[in-house]
Image: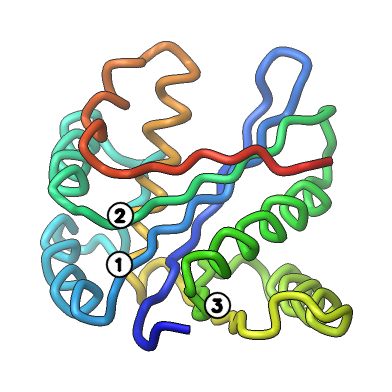
Amino acid sequence: MTQGRCAFVDESSWVDSLTQRYLICATVLSAKDQAMLRPHLSKFLLPGQVKFHWSKESRARRLKVLEFIATLENLVVVVSHVGEIRRNDERYRRKCLETLYSELEIESVANVVLENRSPRQDLSDRKHILALQSSGRFKMIRLTHVSGSSEPLVWISDSVLGALHAAQTGDPDILTRLAGIPIRRITAAD
């Protein structure tokens, strides 16, 4: 596995007519890119703001961040699952993560940084990868959970997912801002 490369992961879920969409986005960055990008992304914070979060930003700020992301040449992997509407979407998350781990393994990326949720949900993520590893899969994958306020690199994945959601819900122009970056879209098996 390539040392220093890391996938920074965020998730999104929404209901679309009679189905629920669950998406996981991973931005794969080299150690050099990680060090270079953190201070640039932090410049997008407003005074008193602790993290950039797509759903809380104005369209103008969203577009500025997308313009910055579009200058990057890093691989972005988006895994989606479309299924029946459920109150608990953890099964969809596991399906998407399993597909993502497979893609990251192909790309020789072992380090996966997930934006944290609740302690119980983070534990569920760790139990999931351990179960997969005990069955002989994804032995090299190492998970770390971080807060979105402490790791600006997860904001890239958050923004890509926000642009995808905007395109699905009536603003397709916003996604064209990311036309220059390699986005690999994959559907998770059920």
N-term mark: 2 or 3: 2
- The location of residue 102, given as percent across then percent down, is 64, 62
N-term mark: 2 or 1: 2
Give the residue at x 30% y 67%: 152
Residue linked to disc 1: 152
Question: Which residue is more in the foreground, 126 or 60?
Answer: 126
Q: Are marks 2 and 1 in contact (CB under 8 Å)?
A: yes
Q: Nearer the viewer, mark 2 or mark 3?
A: 3
Badge 1, how many Cα within 10 Å: few under 14, some, many 20+? Answer: many
N-term mark: 3 or 1: 3
Direction bottom: furthest residue? 3
Residue linked to disc 2: 52
**Quadrant of the rendered image containing residue 122:** bottom right
For the residue labelled by badge 1, is the local secondary structure a helix, a strand or a loop? loop
Give the residue at x 79% y 53%: 90
Q: How many marks?
A: 3
- The location of residue 26, given as percent across then percent down, is 46, 57
> Relative to 136, is 37 on the left or the right?
left
Per the rendering, the mark at residue 145 is: 3
Examine the rendered structure and indicate whether residue 177 appears above or below residue 70: above
Task: State the separation of the CA atoms marked 2 and 1.
Answer: 8 Å
Q: Are marks 2 and 3 in contact (CB under 8 Å)?
A: no
> Relative to 25, is 62 on the left or the right?
left
- The location of residue 36, given as percent across then percent down, is 13, 74
Question: Which residue is more in the foreground, 141 or 171?
Answer: 141
